[in-house]
Amino acid sequence: MDLDFPLQATFLALPLENEAKWQFQALQEELKEYSDCLRFQNPASPHLTLYYWKEVMEIELGSIKETASKIVQRTSPFSIQVELADTFGSRGEDRVLFLKCSFSDELARVKKACPWPENRPFNAHITLARMSHPQKFAVVKKNVMKKLKDCQFEIKFDRIRLYAMVEGRRQTPIEDFVFL
């Protein structure tokens, strides 16, 4: 794969695979009737973001990959639970519909091993959709949340994946780093 630098919208994440990915896609399918106000996360690449860079230069990419390799060498596969669906936003409007994940020591260790500075607290979540029309969403929010009330499921992680925007396509997998 040819990469054009600087890479845009680059991030390290824990990808949802197999059963967890199917569960994620089924939840999105449940909400299709609300597609007039929801812009769904790419169903092919659901993930829990560990760290996001707006832009990455070629010289930085090697260091990111090296760090990811070190993290996975100290990590065994682990599981977390999706606890519930919720929203967050700004200025009184919901902007993101997400799945809240349970706390786990393993997830905390993986996140803590990421050496890059954070400008906000880590909130373990998986984005289901963004609101394309927050006002329309406000009208149907109660119905959406009712459909998601039993959304608990287990996610098994066995790798970290590096993603970036490649040839205009967001969330393109660049490389996997498998836990030992």
Image: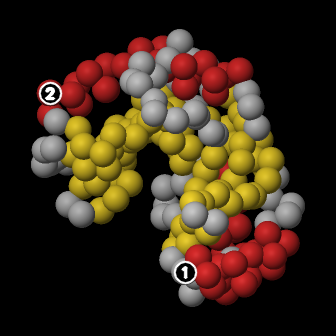
As displayed, is residue 92 above or below residue 4? below
Q: Residue furthest front?
A: 91
Percent across and percent down for residue 109 are: 60, 18
Q: Nearer the viewer, residue 156 or 47?
A: 47
The first of marks 1 and 2 along the sequence is 2
Res 22 visible: no
Kindly report which numbered mark, 1 or 2, lies closer to the viewer in this rendering.
1
Residue 169 appears left or right of 104 = left
Q: Is residue 70 above or below residue 58?
A: above
Q: Residue at x 85, y 64 (%)?
A: 149
Horizontal relation, residue 168 to residue 22: left or right: left
Residue at left offset 59%, top offset 76%:
134
Q: Amino acid at mark 2?
A: Ile
Which residue has dot 1 on it?
133
Query: Where does the image place residue 154, in percent across and percent down from the top left?
Result: 76, 44
Is residue 176 visible in this depiction of the protein? yes
- Residue 59: mark: 2
Instruction: Quote the CA–CA distance across marks 1 and 2.
Output: 39 Å
Looking at the rendered structure, the secondary structure element under dot 1 is loop
Please tell me which residue lies in front, 180 or 54: 54
Question: Hey, what amino acid is under mark 1?
Answer: His
Residue shown at 31% from the left, 26% from the top: 64
